[in-house]
Image (spheres, helix red, strand yellow):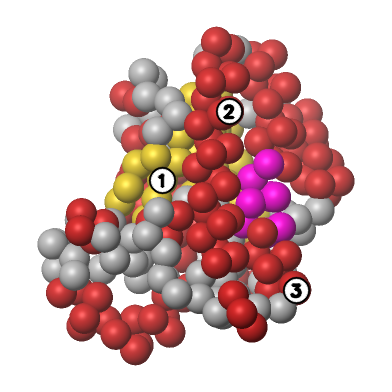
Amino acid sequence: MSFSGKKVLITGGSRGIGRSIVESFARAGADVAFVYHSNEQAAQDVVTSLASEGFASVSAHQCDVSDQSAVDTLVEQLVTSWGRLDILVNNAGIVKDGLLATMDGDSWHKVISTNLDSVYYFCRAVTRPMMSQRSGKVINMSSVAAEFPNQGQANYAASKGGIQGLTRCMATELGRRGINVNAVAPGFIETDMTVAVRNAAEAEIKKSIPLRRLGRPEDISNAVLFLASEAASYITGQILTVDGGLTLGGI
């Protein structure tokens, strides 16, 4: 798939799935801006690595995705610089697991604000530019936990379930303006976020996955690129589960 000339904004792009998405779009010819929270070195490593491959149209932008004003400013700057925005990928997310009975308010609010509020902020910020150009693709990162949560995931599951509802509602509102809105729901993927779970029970997890392996970041970035491509031009309001078959029988 070629994305030559396309302008792409990705949140949470310095590590794991986000980095794979950044790399995939850059290698497909897109101009890419990605957001990171605090790890400037990791973000610059992504830019430097791609530049060494000859992909120089990649930029890193520090932004607190839970700050609506900061999000609005960043999107406005990018649209002004590029003249348009073709694709938004909302990938930023955190986990702060804990049983609901003992979960403090800070753990709840940080996960909701980072995982869900940020999606609303970025989607709202890009809606008017995309409506004006009468085209656009939005891909939001959900999770199988939205429908099949494990214990201790009340905040995370709520945030990802909210993303699915927001995705479907946006699709009904924006389809007439030529904007496709979909979500990807990964299963267990080999990233920093899943290290603790994998260290504790990787062998058992694999037994519950029909394909008998954990997902790789590129499994998710491939799905994102498909949904952002013209091959998916008649797909909107859908949640694409990429889990190796994990949820066929529930978790």
Instruction: Please give the name of the residue rendered at 40% of the width and 33% of the height, measured from the top-left corner.
Output: 238
Placement of the C terminus among the 4 image quadrants = bottom left
Tell whether position 212 is magenta.
Answer: no
Name the residue nearer the viewer: 8 or 102: 102
Instruction: Please give the name of the residue rendered at 52% of the width and 53% of the height, measured from the top-left corner.
Output: 160
Name the residue nearer the viewer: 217 or 176: 176
Q: Amino acid at mark 2?
A: Met
N-term mark: 1 or 3: 3
Q: Residue under circle 2?
A: 170
Q: Which residues lie in the magenta part?
A: 113-120
**Residue 39's quadrant in the figure?**
bottom right
Disc 2 from disc 1: Cα separation: 15 Å
Element on which disc 1 rests: strand
Q: Residue furthest bottom?
A: 200
Element on which disc 3 rests: helix
Seen in the picture, residue 42 relative to 140 is either above or below; the reply is below
Name the residue nearer the viewer: 134 or 83: 134
Cβ atoms at labels 2 and 1 below 8 Å apart: no
Placement of the N terminus among the 4 image quadrants = top left
For mark 3, does the 10 Å Cα neighbourhood hold few (<14), some (14 to 19), or many (20 or more) residues?
few
Disc 1 from disc 3: Cα separation: 27 Å
Disc 3 from disc 2: Cα separation: 29 Å
Instruction: Please give the name of the residue rendered at 29% of the width and 85% of the height, measured from the top-left corner.
Output: 201
Numbered tag placed on residue 184 in the rendering: 1
Q: Residue under circle 3?
A: 106
For mark 2, does the 10 Å Cα neighbourhood hold few (<14), some (14 to 19), or many (20 or more) residues?
many
Answer with left or right where residue 87 lies relative to residue 28: right
